[in-house]
Image (cartoon, rainbow, N blue to C red):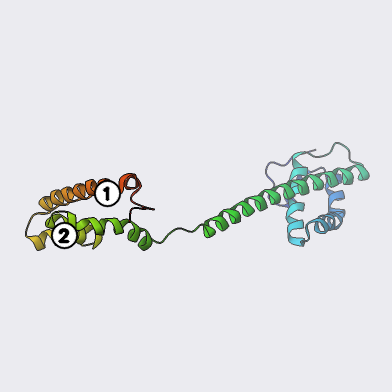
Amino acid sequence: MKKANNPSDSDNALRSLDESIAQLLVENHRRFQSFLARRVGSKEVAEDLLQQSLKKATERPPVSVEEAGVVAWFFTVLKNTLTDYYRAKASEEKKHKELELTADVLLKTKVAPVDEIEAVVCECMNGLLPTLKDNYADLIRRIDLGGESISSVAENLAITENNLTVRLHRARQALKTSLERTCGTCTEHGCLNCTCS
């Protein structure tokens, strides 16, 4: 008996089998396809599984050439192919369910909108800004809270960007010190869930 190198379809697979075995498989083609179709519910899937089974058959052909032995042997090949198919399908369904569960959890997880977080963070800062030097408070209001760019503020104040960056750093440090004195440990977590107001 010959073995197939890499058969690409049922004709090539059958040609590589002993002629009498191939003839038995051809004669029972509809029976095999019907057997698979009843179990998978689709003629197309059944045909794909039959092709896979024929490929397996060429890789390990039976020793016996008796009709009953060959047909029974090929039904075993079909059952093994079905088992592999259902295992792969179950694995795919499990992955799909896990993905759906993860997506569902993510959708139900409430994350506060950025403007809500900014409101919580800025509430303490707004109260402490008047305690800072006027130029520090102005920089924090304009850049950190107002969103102005460093270059536009530097141009407006007629100073270099480097000079402004140093002033902004000092203003932030002064605010940080003031926040730590007023709010305590909640400043370690960015003033979220602050209870000092």
Q: What is the total number of numbered labels drawn onto the structure image?
A: 2
Quadrant housing the C terminus:
bottom left
| Dot 1: element | helix
Residue positioned 81% across, 47% down in the render: 79
Q: Quadrant of residue 4?
A: top right
Pick whichever, 147 or 132, lies toward us.
132
Q: Closer to the camera, 14 or 188?
A: 188
Which kind of residue does numbered mark 1 sit on? Thr
Find residue 112 and report its horizontal and vertical position in percent. Answer: 43, 59
Answer few, some or many: residues within 10 Å of disc 2's Cα (few below 14, many 20 plus, some between 14 and 19): some
Say if 150 sits above or below 1 in the image.
below
Q: How would you rate the neighbour count of disc 1 (Cα within 10 Å): few for under 14, some for 14-19, many for 20 or more? A: some
Q: Amino acid at mark 2?
A: Asp
In screen coordinates, is 168 left or right of 23?
Answer: left
* Residue with the mark numbered 1: 182
* Residue 75 image point, x, y percent: 85, 47
Q: Report the mark closest to the observer, 2 or 1.
A: 1
What element does badge 2 sit on? helix
Is residue 154 visible to the viewer in this orientation of the structure?
A: yes
Q: CA distance from mark 2 to mark 1?
A: 20 Å
Instruction: Give left or right: position of 184 versus 94.
Output: left
Residue at x 49%, y 59% (from the top left corner): 110
Q: Quadrant of the N terminus?
A: top right
Q: Which residue is mark 2?
A: 138
| Nearest the eye: 163 or 125 | 125
